[in-house]
């Protein structure tokens, strides 16, 4: 910073005092003193420069921008101040305005190289913003809110296009029509739900749910009848391999992945579907609804199929052994794209 200034005596005294206060780390007093010097001599551009630099270092960015702008009205060829102002405007997101000040700096000046580097950086950011704006515009045309679900977790779509959405916090599974106009409770705590997370669905619209807080996996037929398939300690994600007739479940507490054979479920579902199709063909009318799509064993602890641990003891960078419930996304909305 300039140490002295050959202007009116009173303003010069205050200018030097402002520097002394700054060196003593008395920032607010220093700022006030420079402002007082400027009030005595409004053309004292060196005082504006020091004031702007101190304001910027103190995080008073908007004040610093105003000080630089006043300085450049007095001394438009101060390329140092042009660059400092442009850099500050860039940091604050005023990209076009920053470019306008950089354009005033001659390429062959002391600050020409710095100005070119900053200008290129700003141009790149401007291009990124244009691309982000384009993507968001396209997204807005394709995106719509089709249902509101508190703390949504798992989501699948059935053969008719209905969305099956789990709400972890409410322990409810909702069924939402494709247009989002109709929503009803497909399953809730009365059907054994407690913290549903992962969901899978097969081609017969049987729904498989990782029931986190209860420590089990439930299968719901398309009527919503629940049947416990197996017990898993803190089940989280669930996936379906219908070709090989298996579901896979991650077991958080034991750091394992468990597979479960669903051949019998798929076989019974296929038989039932064939019966329905035969009835439709014979009567040429809609087949009557069956009370139950699949017949499951009555004893919870004697499920169909055979579960098996296929991998265990995964190493995790963030162990959750002390966590009693998974981290969930706050209540929000369901979107389609």
Image: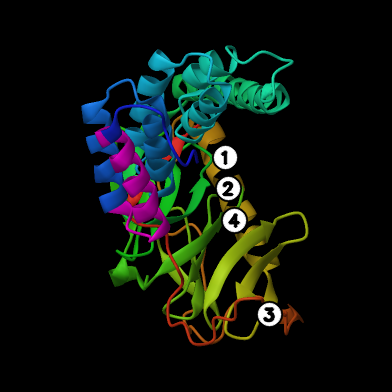
Dot 1 or dot 3: first in sequence order is 3
Kindly state the secondary structure of the residue where label 2 is placed: helix
The residue pinned by badge 4 equals 269
The picture places residue 308, in percent across and down from the top left corner, at: 72, 81
Above or below for 8 versus 152: above
State the separation of the CA atoms marked 1 and 3: 41 Å
The picture places residue 151, in percent across and down from the top left corner, at: 36, 57
Is the magenta region chiefly helix, strand or loop?
A: helix
The residue pinned by badge 1 equals 277
State the separation of the CA atoms marked 2 and 3: 35 Å
Tell me the magenta residue range: 10-28
The structure residue drawn at horizontal position 39% and vertical position 14%, both measured from the top left corner, is 73
The residue pinned by badge 2 equals 273
Residue 26 in magenta stretch: yes
Kindly state the secondary structure of the residue where label 1 is placed: helix
The structure residue drawn at horizontal position 45% and vertical position 27%, both measured from the top left corner, is 143
**For mark 4, does the 10 Å Cα neighbourhood hold few (<14), some (14 to 19), or many (20 or more) residues?**
many
The residue pinned by badge 3 equals 256
Q: Could you tell me if the residues under marks 2 and 4 are in contact, i.e. CB atoms within 8 Å?
A: yes
**For mark 1, does the 10 Å Cα neighbourhood hold few (<14), some (14 to 19), or many (20 or more) residues?**
few
Residue 220 in magenta stretch: no
Kindly state the secondary structure of the residue where label 4 is placed: helix
Kindly state the secondary structure of the residue where label 3 is placed: strand
């Amino acid at each position: 910073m300039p140490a002295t200034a050959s202007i009116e005596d009173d303003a010069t005294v205050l200018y030097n005092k402002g520097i002394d206060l700054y060196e003593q780390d008395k920032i607010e007093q220093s700022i006030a003193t420079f402002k007082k010097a400027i009030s005595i001599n409004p053309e004292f551009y060196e005082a504006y420069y020091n004031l702007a630099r101190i304001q910027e270092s103190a995080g008073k960015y908007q004040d610093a921008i105003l000080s630089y702008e006043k300085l450049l009205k007095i001394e438009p060829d101060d390329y140092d101040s042009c660059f400092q102002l442009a850099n500050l405007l860039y940091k604050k997101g005023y990209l076009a305005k920053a470019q306008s000040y950089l354009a005033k700096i001659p390429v062959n000046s002391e600050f020409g190289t710095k100005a070119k580097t900053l200008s290129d950086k700003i141009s790149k950011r401007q291009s990124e913003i244009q691309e982000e704006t384009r993507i968001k515009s396209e997204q807005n045309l394709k995106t719509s809110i089709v249902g509101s679900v508190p703390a949504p977790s798992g989501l699948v779509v059935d053969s008719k296009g209905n969305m099956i959405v789990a709400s972890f916090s409410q322990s409810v599974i909702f069924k939402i029509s494709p247009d989002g106009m109709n929503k009803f409770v497909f399953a809730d705590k009365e059907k054994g739900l407690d913290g549903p997370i992962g969901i899978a669905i097969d081609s017969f619209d049987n729904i498989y749910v990782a029931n986190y807080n209860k420590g089990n996996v439930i299968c719901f037929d398309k009527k919503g009848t629940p049947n416990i398939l197996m017990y898993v300690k803190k089940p989280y994600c669930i996936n379906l391999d219908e070709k090989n007739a298996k579901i896979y479940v991650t077991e958080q507490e034991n750091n394992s992945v468990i597979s479960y054979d669903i051949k019998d479920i798929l076989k019974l579902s296929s038989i039932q579907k064939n019966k329905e199709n035969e009835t439709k063909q014979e009567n040429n009318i809609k087949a009557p609804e069956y009370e139950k799509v699949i017949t499951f064993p009555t004893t919870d602890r004697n499920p169909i199929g055979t579960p098996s641990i296929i991998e265990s003891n995964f190493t995790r960078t963030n162990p959750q052994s002390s966590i009693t419930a998974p981290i969930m996304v706050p209540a929000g909305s369901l979107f389609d794209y």
